[in-house]
Image (tube, rainbow, N blue to C red):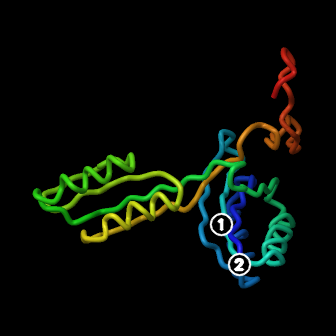
Amino acid sequence: MRRQVLSLLVENNPGVTSHISGLFSRRGYNIDSFSSGVTADPRYTRITIVVSGDEQILEQIEKQLAKLCDVLDIKKLEQGQSVTRELIMVKIRAKDTERQPIINVTEIFHGKIVDVTHDSMVIELTGQQDKLDAFLDLLHGYEILELARTGITGLSRGTADVKMIDENGHLCNLKPREEDGTL
């Protein structure tokens, strides 16, 4: 089993996420993580999906996604050639005497305390999954009241594989800058 992160550029139409997730359920494929959001152009949405399987299953998933009419582009986000992140928010039971050690661990991981009440704290942390898992492991002695994870989102590095939508609505490669020939 191998894990693959896919970044999809899709048309921002009603039901597009339902169509994509439905493809997975119909075929019996599991989604490890699914996150989506509108791009800089509100006509399009970027969806990041994390899937696991053998090479044949991963290849089949990519081919099936490419057949969906709302899917404009699919990129494999490979480690080292992309930047991926996940956000977690964790609510911990914390009395006054327990707060400082939690704050210290949070600072080491560059997290933020986003809410404090007389008996709890909410911490926000962004990073790669292994970093978030290590943070949660260090909180093992504390009572975690609630935990929310966004799932992975990411982009490829550089400009070599950036796709743009031209004025006619066609997908094309990013054009070099005219003044210096760079992307």
8 or 83: nearer the viewer: 83
* Amino acid carrying mark 2 in the image: Met
- Secondary element under disc 2, as helix, strand or loop, is loop
Q: Quarter of the image containing the N terminus?
A: bottom right
* Res. 133 image quadrant: bottom left
* Res. 39 image quadrant: top right
Residue 27's label in the rendered image is: none
CA–CA distance in space, label 2 to label 1: 13 Å
Residue neighbourhood size for the residue with mark 1, other residues' Cα within 10 Å, grouped as few (<14), some (14–19), many (≥20):
many
Name the residue beneath numbered marker 1: 50
Q: Nearer the viewer, mark 2 or mark 1?
A: 2
- Secondary element under disc 1, as helix, strand or loop, is strand
Name the residue beneath numbered marker 2: 1
Image coords of residue 114 (percent x, y):
30, 49
76 or 81: nearer the viewer: 81
Image coords of residue 147 (percent x, y):
38, 67
Q: Quarter of the image containing the C terminus?
A: top right
Image coords of residue 131 (percent x, y):
47, 57
Compared with 74, 54 (above or below) is below
* Amino acid carrying mark 1 in the image: Val
Compared with 179, 99 (above or below) is below
Q: Is residue 121 left or right of residue 17?
A: left
At x 25%, y 71%, the residue is 141
Q: How many marks?
A: 2
At x 24%, y 69%, the residue is 142
